[in-house]
Every structure is written in structure tokens, then in C-alpha cells.
Amino acid sequence: MEEKKIKFGIQNGLNVARAGYTEDQILTACMLADKTGYDSIFYMDHTNVPQWKNAIVLDPWVMLSAIAAITNNVEIGTCVTDAIRRHPSNIALAAITLDRVSKGRAILGIGAGEAQNLKEFCIPFEKPVSKWEEQIETIHALYKSTPDNTVDYDGKYYHLKGACLQAPPVRKPRPPTYMASGGKRTLGLTGKLGDGWLPIGYTPKLFEDHAAQIKASMDTNGRTQEDKDNFQYALDIDVYFSDDAEESWARMKEAVKVSLFKPEILRVHGLKEIEGFDFRKYFTEYSMSNQDWIVKMREAATKIPENVARSSTAVGTPDDVIPTFERFMDAGVNHFVIRFWGKNYFGSIDKFASHVMPALRERAAKQS
């Protein structure tokens, strides 16, 4: 039987932005990850996070090109970008360029967008899922285009007529597309169009439920066995190393509950829907200029049970965090994208590589 592959990556996300790390510090961390055995490095795509005024928020595509230049082994990608703010052709060309400068290591992590990055910039946020499907189809079509093989696309929202790009990707058949999804329709699209799945804010129970929906969609859409075998069930997960797990958890649990608060968590864990909270309005109207929604969400999220919230986050010593990862592996995760929190960022990257990755890779090998 073929050995099960388990991958580990680092995420330059809100953890890095909030800490205010300089570009040099970020690149140093990425070099450390590349040299200590990580498989991937990802970078978030936010316009701003003004609730943290001292945060530094950078463009992911520019930073990933810099990361490509100082690493040799890791895959590199967005976690995640969107095409609501750009034409899909811009995303396709950026992904191809990253793939070429990294010599075939690029990943396109892509979502449908969110109001937080759009409202203040007066970018419409309408029919995001329908647009998302067309965006990915357009991007995939352009990956294959050349001056001798132009492509047409006639969607409701996007159109191509004799279009081409003139820089073929290195990875074949294309840089993999990791889709960020968490609803019935978007999970179905992930099974139809994706090469991987990259959600955030999950418990093992929810991950297993949603992975099953993706697998069912892959069957429905006639994906090949090779597609299924190579599909990456990734997860953006938080790790906080601490000598006292209980003390650390007490300080962070309310923030974790907010990150988990969504209808699907309530459904799979059999929790009664929080009365009076309008999830649809939250996800379409919340923005940095309207803090009322985040206040309402924080109040409602406190009702999530402790054991549910704690199952989502790895806190404590290396021995404390290993079982959390094992539960997610049992739920189907094969690619962890880690946001390290805490003061010793470089130490956390090294500690995980030295003490946690070997144990988890050994476990995956034994299960093969």
C-alpha cells in the first residue's frame, strides 16, 4: 500500500500581520520553514484589518514572489485570494508567474470574497458564489491558453473572446487550485473544480462532514481516480505553544469561539441555532466601518460549548498539541497550514518541526 502523505505548512496570516513583523522577519521565518522540513508556505490576502491599527497588511502576490526567491523546497500559495477584486485573468497570470519564478511550486488558494475587503472600496458583493464558479472556470481555461490556442468563455458574469496568456505554467496540468468553501453549494463546487480544499475555523467533526460532501461531489461530477487520490484536504489551523495549556486556553477561548461561530458548526454539533443572529447579514454586511456586527457575533459565540471550541485549536506543549492534530488527521486532513501565535514565532516554527511533525509523520506512515 502506498504510504500516506501528510503535509505541513505555515500561514502568514492575521498572526503575522497583527504582530507587525517586518518584511525581513517574515522572509527569515519562511527560510527557516523551508530548511526545517515544512512542505508549504501560504500568505493571506486582505486589504486591511483596521480593528488592529498597528498591523501590517501586505500584498500576497508580491510577498510570495519574494518568498519564492529565498526558498527552494516549499510549495507557496495564497490563503486565500479572490477574483471579486480583480478580473480572473489577473489571478491566472499572477498564479502562472508565481509558478514560473518558483520553478513549479505555486498553489492558487481562492475563495469567493468577503465584505470586509470590499465595502469601503465600493466593490459590489453580489452573487459571489455564482461568480466564483465562473471565475475558476475562466482561470482554468486561461491556464491552457496560448496564441495558437485562444479560449472563449461565455458566462453570465465573465466573458472571454479569443483570449490567451503567453506564459505557460511549470506545474502540470496546472498550479493546483485550493478552494476555500464551507457551505453546501461551495463544497459542491470544490468537488467539481478543485484540486484541494482550504477552510479555516473548523472542528474535526465539521471537517469530516464537509470532506464527505466534497467526496460526494467528486463522484457526481465524474472526477478521475487520480484527481481523488491527489486531492489535498487542507486546513488552516491555529497553534499556540505554551507551558500552561489551561492558562493559555482561558485567555484565548472567547476569540476561538468567535472564529468558529457559523451555522455549520451549530448543525454538526447539534447546537440550537442562536436566536436572533442573522448569519447571512453578518457575512454580507460586516466590514471594518461597521463594528456592530462583530459585537453581536462575540456575544452569541460565547454560547458555543467549551469542548467544541477547544477541539479546533492546538494549545500547550508539543505533547498537548499532538492529539489535536491526530483528531484532524482521523477526520481526513492531509495538509495542515499552521498559524503560529505567541511571542516566539521563530521558536514555534522550529519547535513544531522538531517535536510535532516527526510524531505525526510516523503516525501517518503506520496507518498506510
Image: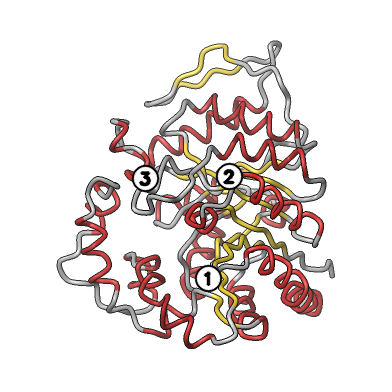
Relative vertical location of residue 365 with respect to residue 149 in this rendering, above or below: below
Of pointers 2 and 3, the one earlier in the residue sequence: 2
Relative vertical location of residue 81 with respect to residue 85 in this rendering, above or below: below
Measuring from the top left, give residue 351's x and y in whole percent: 72, 72
**Quarter of the rendering containing residue 336:** bottom right
Q: Disc 2 residue type?
A: Thr
Measuring from the top left, give residue 217's x and y in whole percent: 52, 54
Picture quarter with the C terminus:
bottom right
Visual colour scheme: secondary structure
Secondary-structure class at tag 3: loop
**Do residues under tags 2 and 1 come within 8 Å of each other at their CB atoms?**
no
**Direction from residue 82 to residue 42 in the image, left or right:** right
Residue placed furthest toward the left: 276
Distance of label 1 from label 3 (alpha carbons): 25 Å
**Quarter of the rendering containing residue 322:** bottom right
Relative vertical location of residue 357 with respect to residue 60 in this rendering, above or below: below
Relative vertical location of residue 343 with respect to residue 101 in this rendering, above or below: below
Q: Few, some or many C-alpha atoms within 10 Å of disc 1 (few <14, some 14-19, many ≥20)?
A: some
Measuring from the top left, give residue 31's x and y in whole percent: 76, 52
Name the residue that disc number 1 marks: 208
Q: Disc 3 residue type?
A: Glu
Name the residue that disc number 3 marks: 114
Secondary-structure class at tag 2: strand
Q: Few, some or many C-alpha atoms within 10 Å of disc 3 (few <14, some 14-19, many ≥20)?
A: some
**Direction from residue 50 to residue 144 in the image, left or right:** right
Secondary-structure class at tag 1: helix
Name the residue that disc number 2 marks: 78
Q: Disc 1 residue type?
A: Glu
Of pointers 2 and 1, the one earlier in the residue sequence: 2
Distance of label 2 from label 1 (alpha carbons): 24 Å
